[in-house]
Image (cartoon, helix red, strand yellow):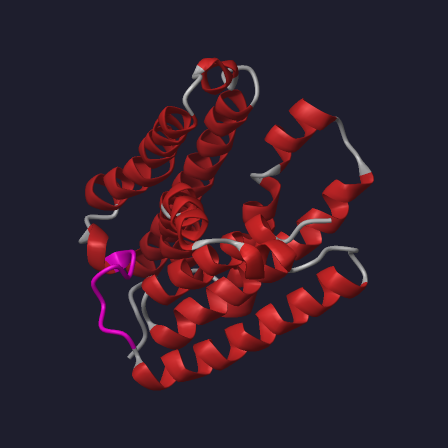
Amino acid sequence: MQAEPGKTEQSASERSSSFKHLLIFILLFFAVWVVRATVLFFIDERIQSEAGRSVYSNAVKFLLWVMPAVIYLRKHDRQPALRYLKLTTPINKKGLVYAILLSALYFAATILFETRAGGKNLHDLYAASLAEWLKAFAFIFFSPISEEILFRGFVLHQFAERLKFWTANLLTAGLFTLIHWPFWIWHNGFQGWIIQASAGIFLMAILLGYIVKMTNSLWPAVAVHIANNLLAHFLHT
């Protein structure tokens, strides 16, 4: 049965309007974060305590990355936020096995590349004490949660509702890579290492998006993201 012209046209109009609202949300988020990561970063620098600086930074990130996405889902999309963000969905166990294997290959390739081509070594990774591991974990733990909730939980899901998964995943990975640029360029200027770092982040972001698709949950991607940041913390030149 053919749909009524009025209803088809209305549905297309609603989809277009919804996509515009999403783009506006993303643009506003980027605008706010650019200001926070550049001209307002002096606030972080004035906090003398490393722990206090970390608490402040993670609190600001949660307020700017997580809360707007939750509010958007509840007020605009009328969606149950926790389930939509795949924070409460059951994990696909078969997909989890594939995700673990794929992540192991990714980390092995990363270590091989960084030690052979990047001139880095694993000495600190092996030599670190339990206290050093716990300290690094405590400082690294919270940021990946906020980042995954916004980008793989919200942005990727929103794009995937409108586009093919791999198109959505590539777009999300690109946006996730670009969100790092304001801080880097503001504090260091545009240097060659930014391209190399961006390539690494882009590849990791693609992997994280695919892990969410395979496992039907955000938490495996959060775990891999934390593990990646820990590895980066202990790999040194």
Instruction: Please give the range of residues in magenta.
Output: 84-91
Residue at screen point 44% across, 41% down: 20
Residue at screen point 51% across, 60% down: 168
**What secondary structure is the magenta-colored segment mainly?**
loop
Front position in the image: 149 or 130? 130
Residue at screen point 52% across, 58% down: 228
Q: Residue furthest bottom?
A: 94
| Percent x, y of residue 84 | 26, 58
Front position in the image: 72 or 121? 121
Q: Is residue 86 magenta?
A: yes
| Percent x, y of residue 192 | 81, 41
| Percent x, y of residue 120 | 73, 55
Residue 99 sits in quarter: bottom left
**Total count of labels:** 0
Q: Is residue 221 left or right of residue 230?
A: left
Q: Quadrant of the N terminus?
A: bottom left
* Up/down of 230 relative to 4, above or below: above
Q: Is residue 19 magenta?
A: no
Asked if residue 153 shows in the view, the reply is yes
| Percent x, y of residue 110 | 66, 65
Front position in the image: 19 or 50? 50
Front position in the image: 164 or 214? 214
Asked if residue 161 shows in the view, the reply is no
Q: Is residue 56 left or right of residue 207?
A: left
Residue at screen point 46% across, 53% down: 129
Q: Is residue 200 left or right of residue 18?
A: right
